[in-house]
Amino acid sequence: MTDTKQLNRLQASFDKGRISRRNFLTSSAALGVAATAPFILSATHAAASASDTYDYIVIGAGAGGCAVAARLGEDQTKNVLVLEAGPPDDNPFIHVPAAFPNLFKSELDWDYSSVPQEGMGGKSVYMPRGKVFGGCTSINAMIYKRGNPACFDAWGKDNEGWSYADVLPLFKKGENNERGESELHGVGGPLNVADQRDPNPLSKAMVAAAVEQGYAAQDEFNQAEQEGFGLYQVTQKNGFRNSAAVAYLHPAVERGNVTIQGESLVHKLVIEGGVCTGVSFEAGGEMHVAKATGEVVLAAGAIGSPQILMLSGIGAKADLEAHGIDVVHDLPGVGENLQEHAMVAVAHESTQPITLAAATDPEQAELFKSGMGLLTSNIGEAGGYLTVNEDAIAPDLQFHFTPTYFINDGAGNPEGHGFTLMPGIVGTKSVGNVKLVSADPAEKPAIDPAIFSDEHDLEVMLFGIKVARKILGSAAMTPYRGAEVVPGEAVQSDDELRDYIRKNSQTIYHPVGTCKMGSDDMAVVDASLRVHGIAQLRVADASIMPTIVNGNTNAACMMIGEKCADLMKA
């Protein structure tokens, strides 16, 4: 394992100019981790004073917030303030792809847990959310997946400008895909998208095993025809994580007109006569108010954004009054419509010591210096899609394969070498909510994703676990396959498997929908992302999704930030 004290001393030496960047990179890599890119290490972290006024204020430095702030800052006549509750992204574990599970439940994670889930026998599920520059893009598995075109066409039916034809140019604008420019992909954008530099032999074997079972080989999951199995593209550059902070935020800060204020907890929005004019936040133990002459953009995510709205008096009247919050605008949809993906592990022992359990071996640090080896792994290296229900608008079952154990968010991992294939429901029909538990902004809200409240989701998972077992039992996996660790050979009947799924599922870390876009009574924002009933306030994050996309949400959130900036400029 990495010597954390030594790493901290190394970081301090670099910060004080005692060692060169070259020595810092080399020495930290030798410790089994790597440093950030140069522009991250040198990024400024300026504080906003109580008297500061900006053209725009962006709350949250996650996927959507970084994108919208950077694009707004392209106009050099405008000043943009970004408020982020977490610190700068200078922890080396962020930038070493395989190290991200080390950040779970750390100071860079909001470390949320759901309320007990009735559909899971009363179990609470862990819901990590990034609390750091880059937000979840600094602690996620870096899979570049947009969602099926049909998902966006469903949005566009009730929200003009959000169909797939409308959003594809935004995806391409933000992307620098190393495969080159095509009908589907762009080059020259801030976000680097790459094929994995050094995928694990186990991941390749799983894909071969799926093909043996008659499933298609797939190398392009960002198209209408998603079915099949393959290796995922990742948001990496030269083997390092390419987060929203790396791609968008730090270059914007360097231009000089975007200010990032970290470790700032937003208490509430300042609303005057139905107009959002600023933000009240806590930093350094003191309260500050920053004013916006233009607009405020809320991009605190599917949990943070509805919480901030409710703390500001925008939400369901009865809920606000129950916590003694003055009602500014009765908007009942705030915090409702929470949707999430869930998955469950099928894991085997590995008979060969080639899994990520060997990532701390000294030779891996040497390989990582050249952007190769186990440390470049995004852990969720491979996977695939299947359509289970004929009425699904897009494939509703997604698989994630990890060349290591990944059981119960990693907390259930045994020692030694193993591999895991996780079927997950991505055509989610279960719907929950986010509620305040008090008027204290420091107190975590009550989060209820209502997992398996709709039996449809459980049955898709049941189908998926059978497919996973079939794939892992294929000849291509025979050279690596040891005993099944979970569910275990004793778990065979449908009822036994359903019980296993209910007790052992986890989220895929994709909460969305709590400030949904639309024009119905439960919509929170309109098609221009403006909050209904409040002027100069928009939302630009996963919370605006009316329905969840059928894949990893990172790319879609950056697209939402791009879209919001375009709408504001227009």
Image: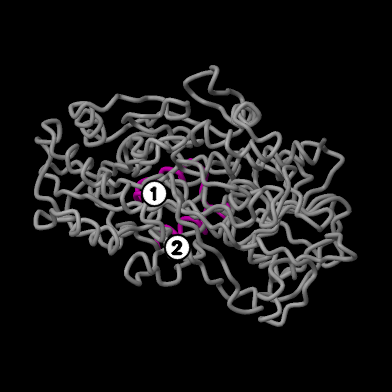
Q: Residues within 10 Å of mark 1 (few under 14, many from 20)?
A: many
Label 1 residue SS: loop
Dividing the picture into quadrants, the one containing residue 533 is: bottom right
Q: Which mark is residue 450?
A: 2
The mark nearer the N terminus, 2 or 1, is 1
- Say which of marks 2 and 1 sits in front: 2
Q: Is the magenta stretch mostly helix, strand or loop?
A: helix
46 to the left or right of 474? right
218 over 446 or under it: above or below = above
- Looking at the rendering, in which quadrant would you find the C terminus? top right
Magenta stretch, residue numbers:
5-32
Is residue 7 a member of the stretch shown in magenta? Answer: yes
Percent of width and height locating residue 431: 49, 57
Q: Residue at x 60, y 53 (%)?
A: 543
- Looking at the rendering, in which quadrant would you find the N terminus? bottom left
- Residue indicated by mark 1: 33
Percent of width and height locating residue 309: 70, 64
